[in-house]
Image (cartoon, helix red, strand yellow):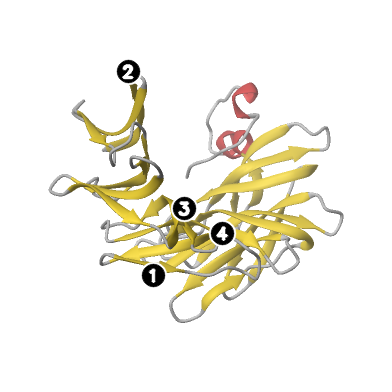
Amino acid sequence: MTFVGGDAIGMAQHAYLWKFDGTQIDLGTLGGTFSSANAVSADGNVVVGSANTASQGHAFRWTSAGGMVDLGTLGGTTSQANAVNANGSVVVGTANNGSNNSHAFRWTGGVMTDLGTLGGLYSYGQFVSADGSVVAGYGPNASNQTNAFRWTSGGGMVNLGTLGGTTSFASAMSADGSVVVGGAYIASNTQNAFRWTSAGGMVNLGTFGGTYASANAVSADGKVVVGEAQDASNVSHAFRWTSATGMQTVEAWLTASGVMVNPLLFTGGAREC
């Protein structure tokens, strides 16, 4: 088991890799005083994030054999790595281009590729499938309305749409990239949780009667979604959703499974499956 993060060292902050045996490895920087780790590969051997050079923040990829490597930019000054695929060979994130706009990127084999936008000025690459072939994130369309996207090499960047309103954003993606979850506005411009598939498009998972819900994570196979949703009194509850049960509070799900729970523990939002 491995974890990544950033620790203050004097007046600086360095990214680190923590292993289950208690070992904590300082990943260093790219010449500046700051670095932060944002994701780690499934086997714990590759870490990605952002680190300062002498003058700018750049995306990095770290391995125990090669140390911290600067992934560069798309012609601009800054970049940040947000996710890495299972074996560490593909990195996704956001990088400044020569026009001083930030675009989602996919890096592999030493090459950073600009994934474009949905018609707006910028886009953010946030998630990558286990095999590295699918990227998800968000960015503005030509009308400057932020929408979730899914990118593949064959289809490019595809707008996942909304639930009738103007805005959507992706919060997580299944391991094979076939399911994307997040939050989207309905026609009344209140936000509901969604689950998107290529076969069914964006499906509204609803709320508990309130005006806000967001799907925050999805299981590897895409069948279980968790997040937070408000009830009619605008109190937030952690939820678990499947196609069989629909949206349940985590409290109700555990109770139905024979577990005694304290209801106060389950207000707020579930964030991991």
Of tags 1 and 3, the one toward the viewer is: 1
Residue 225 shown left or right of residue 6 in the figure: right
Of tags 3 and 2, the one toward the viewer is: 2
Label 4 – label 2 distance at C-alpha: 33 Å
Element assignment for label 1? loop
Which residue is rendered at x = 55% and y = 25% of the image?
A: 260
Of tags 4 and 3, the one toward the viewer is: 4
Element assignment for label 4? loop
Q: Residue furthest front?
A: 55
Look at label 2 and name its amino acid.
Gly
Instruction: Answer with mark 4 or mark 2, whichever residue precedes in sequence.
Output: 2
Q: Which residue is mark 2?
A: 10
Q: Which residue is mark 1?
A: 133
Label 4 – label 3 distance at C-alpha: 33 Å
Instruction: Answer with mark 4 or mark 1, whichever residue precedes in sequence.
Output: 4
Label 1 – label 3 distance at C-alpha: 18 Å
Q: Residue furthest right?
A: 188
Residue 16, relative to residue 116: is it above or below? Answer: above
Look at label 4 and name its amino acid.
Asn
Q: Nearer the viewer, residue 47 or 50?
A: 50
Q: Nearer the viewer, residue 177 or 117?
A: 117
Residue 64 position within the rendered picture, expressed as x and y whole percent measured from the top left:
16, 44
The reply to whether residue 131 is visible in this rendering is no
Neighbours of disc 3 within 10 Å: few (<14), some (14-19), many (20+)? some
Q: Which residue is mark 3?
A: 219
Residue 44 position within the rendered picture, expressed as x and y whole percent measured from the top left:
24, 45
Of tags 2 and 1, the one toward the viewer is: 2
Q: Which residue is mark 4?
A: 101
The reply to whether residue 44 is visible in this rendering is yes
Instruction: Answer with mark 2 or mark 1, whichever residue precedes in sequence.
Output: 2
Label 3 – label 2 distance at C-alpha: 39 Å
